[in-house]
Image (cartoon, rainbow, N blue to C red):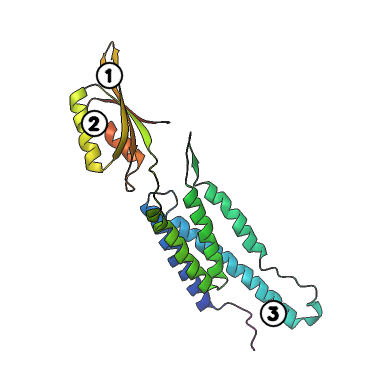
Amino acid sequence: MILKLSVTTVEILIRLLAAVVISGLIGYDREQKNHPAGIRTHILVCVGACVIAMIQQEIGFEALAFAKAQPQFAGVIRADEARLIAQVVSGIGFLGAGTIVVTHRAVTGLTTAASLWATAGLGLAVGMGYYRIAGISALVVLAVLALLKKVIVVHPAFKRVEIQYTEKTATREQLQAYFADKKIKIERVSFKVSRLDSGVVYTNVYAIDLPHEMSYVQLVDDLSAFDHMQQVRLVNV
């Protein structure tokens, strides 16, 4: 039996390519759903973890080669293959925390943070050469992200947008046409009329749920461009 004491260049390229493909699929799912960490972030996390795993493996190979060449030092050489890997597992938490957004009564970004953590684990598996573990695990992660949400019925998280305008009839017709065109779901709406020195100001507060391909930034930007619009802003529930 020949003891393997190094990772070949071909193996390095194969592992890096596998890390890019696996993490790219996961990142694509996140990016299609407008989450903060997309394809590039997931690829970099996975490739970085893969590189660290290969470095750790090379350290172990070097220790074995040195022990083989210098048997008198075999008893004092230490090469813990889990040391750098453990730092990746704990360190990726800081990056994942950056994707979590805490608002008044809601926490978003947890799934993306978890996907980054899982992607780092996949990178470690690929970097160590455990392709079967990495491949099967990647399929499970993708299934959870892409399919599980379709199986489990989740009530939409409605947000509220406050709109102030001056021309009642024309603006309401514009809003109704816009919501219908963008397929925006409206759970409820409240109305308020304020009589000021400058005239009458109408205030509508809509509880809405946006489609996946649309962001609230785009919504506010679009509505702000309407004629007779005074103010558009998101409000806490």
Query: Which residue appears farthest toward the top when viewing the image?
Result: 197
Q: Amino acid at mark 1?
A: Val
Q: Nearer the viewer, mark 1 or mark 3?
A: 1
Q: Nearer the viewer, mark 2 or mark 3?
A: 2
Magenta-span inclusion, residue 215: no
Q: Amino acid at mark 2?
A: Phe
Q: Position of residue 63 (x, y in %)?
A: 70, 75
Circle 3 packing at 10 Å, graded few (<14), some (14-19), many (20+), is some
Residue picked out by circle 3: 65
Residue 209 is left or right of residue 180, and the answer is: right
Residue 39 in view: no
Query: Magenta span covers which residues?
Result: 1-6
Q: Split into 4 quadrants, where in the image is the N terminus?
A: bottom right
Residue 86 is left or right of residue 144, and the answer is: right
Residue appearing at x 45%, y 66% in the figure: 139
Point out which mark residue 201 bears.
Answer: 1
Q: Position of residue 154 (x, y in %)?
A: 40, 47
Report, in whole angstroms, how far the alpha carbon at label 1 lies from the one at label 3. 80 Å
Circle 1 packing at 10 Å, graded few (<14), some (14-19), many (20+), is some
Q: On screen, 186 above or below 113? A: above
Residue picked out by circle 2: 226
Residue 152 is left or right of residue 180, and the answer is: right
Q: Split into 4 quadrants, where in the image is the C terminus?
A: top left
Q: Nearer the viewer, mark 1 or mark 2?
A: 1
Q: Position of residue 133 (x, y in %)?
A: 53, 70
Q: On screen, 31 above or below 187? A: below
Report, in whole angstroms, how far the alpha carbon at label 1 lies from the one at label 2. 15 Å
Q: Position of residue 115 (x, y in %)?
A: 49, 56
Residue appearing at x 23%, y 37% in the figure: 178
Q: Label 1, secondary structure: give it.
A: strand
